[in-house]
Amino acid sequence: MPWLTPHVGAQLVDLGSVMLLLTCFAIVAQRRLSACVDLFALQSVFLAMTATLVAFLTGTRHIYIAAALTVAVKGFVIPRVLRRVIERLNVTRELVMNVNVPASLLICGALVMTAFFITRPIISFGHLLTRNSLAIALAIVLIGFFTMIARQKAVTQLIAFLVMENGLFLGATAATYGMPLIVELGVFFDVLVAALIAGIYTNRLQDAFDSVDTSRLSELKE
Amino acid sequence: MTVTITTMAVAVLLCAPFAAGCWSLLIRTSRQLHLVNLGSMGLLVAAEILIARTVLTQGAVTAFDEMVYIDALSSMILFIIGIVGLACSLYMRSYMDEQVARGTVAPNRLNLFFFLFHMFLLAMVLATVANSLGVQWVAIEATTLATTFLIAFWRRRESLEAGWKYLILCSVGISLALFGVVLMYYSSLRVLGDVSSALNITQLQAIATQLDAHILKLAFVFLFVGYGTKVGLVPMHSWLPDAYAEAPAPVAAMLAGVLETVAVYAILRSRGIVDQAVSPEFSGSLLALFGLVSFSIAALFLLLQHNYKRMLAYSSIEHMGLAMVGFGVGGPIGIFGGLFHLVNHAFAKSLAFFAAGNIHQRYKTVEIGEVHGVASVMPGSALALLVAGLALAALPPFALFASEMQIVTALGTSGLPGGWGSRGVSGSILLLLLCSLVAFAALLYRITGMVWGAAPAAVTRGEPWSTGHLSLVLLGLLLVGLCWVLPSPLRQLLDMASALLGGG
Amino acid sequence: MPIPAILSAMALSVAHALALLTLAPFVVGLIRKLQARFQCRRGASLFQPYFDLAKLFRKQPAVSTATSWIFTATPYIVFGSTLTAGLLVPVFVSQVPLSFAGNIIALVYLFALGTFFLILAGLDAGSAFGGMGGSREAIIASLTEPAMILSIFAIALTAGSTNLSAIVHKTALMDGVASDPVPRLMALAALFIVTLAETGRVPVDNPATHLELTMIHEAMVLEYSGRYLALLEWASAVKLLVFLTLIANVFFPWGIATAPTSQALAIGAAVYVVKVSVLAALIGLIECMFAKLRLFRVTDLLGVAFILALLGLLFFYILQD
């Protein structure tokens, strides 16, 4: 494809990363849990598309495998697990948020700027193709971290953790064209098991506390 | 390809826990479970003694096409894993039997317990011997996953809460560490080109001076914060007291003694690489700062505790902070002191948790105020608690005193990294001594309060000899013995390890 | 300017205004028809809004004696400001004759002028509905303004000028894929949400409702009748059309006439009608898919628009090579 010059390719990769960031913001702005899960699945699909694009432009074959795994595991399996958890727990929305939506959005905007600021010294000598994606990846990690603090339902905290992992995968793809395959497989395995464990855990929490509102987890104190 | 004894030993190291774990799922009787556990642990110890011998004579060992890398530092950590693991397996024999007899644990859940325990062991061993930083990361995250259900094993509300906090906080922290690993890989790729072995410790150590300082600084910050969450450094420690208090005693012992040490190992490995490209002051100041803060805050919180398991947890944070200070200050004394401190602390803390577990089983309470007269009720455990408590309080005849003094000496001679001036150095020494005095007083007061006095009438007296006491004896002897004589292989190992970390 | 040029400029402006005025009710009718089709109804005729306007102009207005001059002046002010704003936006020619008179900021504040008077008129009649509608509209207007300005600034930065004609002309002349896709995408998303908010479409406000709990724009014009109501309805339709034109021609300007030759003008007009119809269809689809948000959730949505616009601006600077 003659029009797919490196410059255009870089722009497309940037576009993909920004779509990921937008889904992050959408997750932060959401109150319905099922919408959060769908957005996470969408984000994983965007991630796989961006990774495939990077693989195509740089000719690194093993990213294809990682991208396929992303779609399979994070695009289908984990959202299914989460949806089943949500159904069984009968929680649908986040009733009380530690930080309200407009303030969360502003803080996330500030986190994006912080991420760019932090990665500025190392971005300036990166590959042309994926420079900005590393900063966006760090931004996604920070936004996931913030979401975990700002939300109370256990399921939302789990989704925030998975968003962090997505950001890390984007960072790995952007900065290093993917980690060594064995590490990628290990990370996927870890994430899958973590999601399953957390899913089982929320059931136990529900049984013990009759809610998965982590603000109720306040019995253990100093 | 000649299969040397060392390679076989490494294979045993990795396969034994894995096989034992899978086998545990199928076994029916608890006696067989314990036998399998002890067997695999014994194999583990034997394998690592073999490997340690090879390392002492030959230096570093690599195996399986450079996927496994064991040098003196890893060997030392393996030694800790082995000894504490063996003691734990012995202890579990009596502890779990008692729990099953009481009906707290359904016999079929015991399979799950042992399976998770073996996976936990496997993950820790893998984290110690892996050559690739990425595989090390995967293993450490796997330890978090394996131990979540172990912590929440009793399924009480508090246990679930502690387990959830643990899962979330540690996973988040370790994800930050992954970013650090990615950055390390990034910097290494720029020198080595696109090679999958660019994350290997051997490769990174070889090219360390050519790596870019900026990237490595950022990478180290992320790695330190990430793995520091696992170590329990303040302010990432909030999961630790809850998890240690709610977990079953053998699990708490393994977490406190071994897992923290493995996390420290991960930090030290990255530090070793980073220090060759960036000046040691940078990482040193970070380590020392967090260490000091952890030490002080933990000592203060130690005063407030009325739950003896939480007290031991804060003592863990305190000692890890001290070890961090030792590593941060650097120099031969500082690093040797830090490593020695890790060894001693592992033994002392696991001994303390075993004794605490026994007390918990007998007295059925974790409140310090309700436990009295352990000496008359359970003399063996009382002695163990006393020995461990005095050791943790860093009393002179015990080895922890020696390592603490080494660290303070190093602080005095080398000063704090990062140019804090003599005021800062004397201030921090004063702070250290003050806080250790506070911790000393608190621990001593509480433990003597528990050990002596009149026992409540409702508690059954007498402590029949069981396999669990073997572990108490083993660890107690080690603790007492190490303060008189440091066996030469161990000393050599420690020397080599500290030389590797730049203290030579 | 030589006289023929002035005459042709005037003719172009008149054609511009006529185009806006005639096309606006059609767009509203199109949205309603598409909505009806999606809901499996036949729906009213496509030209029903024209018939409605004609009917309203024929009727005699009833004005409450409790009102002041603001009440009777507002329809004209709103109509005039909206049409003037419309004249600033390129419709089928990229260089609008009135482009010297105002840029993006003038556009935003002309709309604000209309909104301001509408709020006042709502309060003027002294009825509860008017006051309620006015206060709700004030919340929404104060939240959409920063988002709109930031998103338009993001575009202005990519084009290097705040003059709408200059922006559209420059973008239309570039061929191939536009540069800076990321800031443009985010500004587009922000501006789309702002359009829905400013023109009173679902999910911000339901234009067909007259329930007290849900009215915003309808509440403010509740007291009007006859030709006043006709002017206000027409103005609201023109406002919708101007926003759609803004989106269509600033973000997707290809096809617009860059020189006032008759052939380019014809193509430009045809392309413009197609683009606006597509956008209207999209709005109709969105109105069917989403429910109206509660007023407190509208602030969340507008916060999202603001953040998107802010990020678009940020990314313009950061993502430069």
Image: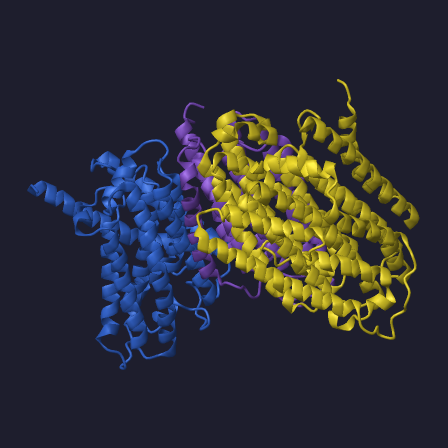
At 14% from the left and 43% from the top, the residue drawn is C8
Q: Nearer the viewer, residue A107 or A220?
A: A220
Looking at the image, residue C255 sits to the left or right of residue C76; the answer is right
The N terminus of chain A is located in which quarter?
top left
The reply to whether residue B224 is visible in this rendering is yes
* Image x and y of residue C70, in percent: 24, 73
The reply to whether residue C193 is visible in this rendering is no
The picture's colour for chain C is blue
Image height of C85 relative to A222, above or below: above
Chain coloured purple in this rendering: A
* Image x and y of residue B446, in percent: 71, 68
At 60% from the left and 52% from the top, the residue drawn is B322
Looking at the image, residue C7 sits to the left or right of residue B435; the answer is left
At 39% from the left and 35% from the top, the residue drawn is A124
Q: Residue furthest bottom?
A: C66
* Image x and y of residue B210, in percent: 48, 29
Chain coloured yellow in this rendering: B
